[in-house]
Image (tube, rainbow, N blue to C red):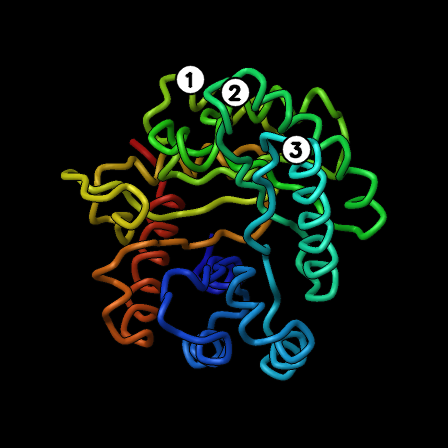
Amino acid sequence: MDEETALSRLSFNQITCDRWRMDEAIEGCARAGISTISLWRHKLAEYGLEVTARHLRTAKLQVSSLCRGGYFPAATAAERQARIQDNQRAIEEAATLGAPVVVLVCGPAPDRDIAAARRMVADGIAQLLPFAAAHGVRLGIEPLHPVFAADRSVITTLAEANDLIEQFDSPWVGAVIDVYHVWWDPTLYAQISRATGRIVGFHLNDWPANMGVPFNSRQMMGDGVIELDRITRAVLATGYIGPIEVEILNTDLWAEPGDIVLARLRERYLKLMHDVATPQN
């Protein structure tokens, strides 16, 4: 993959510069020569849906995904239905923005019953699928590292995500593979291959050698322990041709000027993609 092609696939996930407002993130991407951005709903709510859509068009930026939907499990039927309705709003927002994917962070168990929570996740996706299809938006199941099972998602492996995807057998649901969450899995490469044709998102970052708070300790590519080149080759080998998002939640990074972060992000990403394209011995 040449540099121009690699850069055309790079998507900046706006949480990487969390202190930037929506307009600052859009304009920062334009300055950095990054043509695709991934958006978060709380930032969208602050800035406004229609004004965001206009600003994106003016800056000629595409949207790779909208984060997040999901959080399906809840203690009562009324709460579960309210969450379905919120997911429907997320799908409508994605359609307005031209985002092809809503990323699903599936949610924790409300009452320690993980098996029941996983059934609620499946039921929630089943309810959403017709709505998503009608709006032309895919649902991207993102398995999270098991450390997040208690507070963010009971779907903790790519195998679980693949099981759900195969259960629905729909073009409107697929897997979002974030290296931070799956790098440790001994079945990872078999599961990436199993997801062939059903990968709807791929996220880059790195896992630190010494972990702080898991939520906001992600590292810039090359600053951690993940075998990024091998994982990236495996994902690309499935035929995945979509955007490659850089999503880094890190308090130290958030304190830096956004333009400096984007410049380093772009440099590290291009180095990684060069390494991925270099023939192996």
Q: Which residue is mark 3?
A: 197
Per the model, the C-alpha gap separating discs 2 and 1 is 8 Å
Q: Nearer the viewer, residue 186 or 149?
A: 149
The C terminus sits in image quarter: top left
Query: Which of pointers 3 and 2 indicates the residue nearer the eye?
Result: 2
Q: Which residue is mark 1?
A: 187
Q: Is there a contact, CB below 8 Å, between mark 2 and mark 1?
A: yes
Does residue 181 appear left or right of residue 106 in this picture? Answer: left
Q: Amino acid at mark 1?
A: Thr
At which x and y percent is residue 132? 77, 45
At which x and y percent is residue 91? 71, 53
- Seen at 68% across and 21% down, the residue is 166
Circle 2 Cα neighbour tier, 10 Å, few/some/many (<14 / 14–19 / ≥20): some
At which x and y percent is residue 210? 14, 39
Q: Nearer the viewer, residue 47 or 176?
A: 47
Question: Tag 2, which secondary structure?
Answer: helix
Query: Of callouts 3 and 1, which one flags the residue occurring earlier in the amino acid sequence?
Result: 1
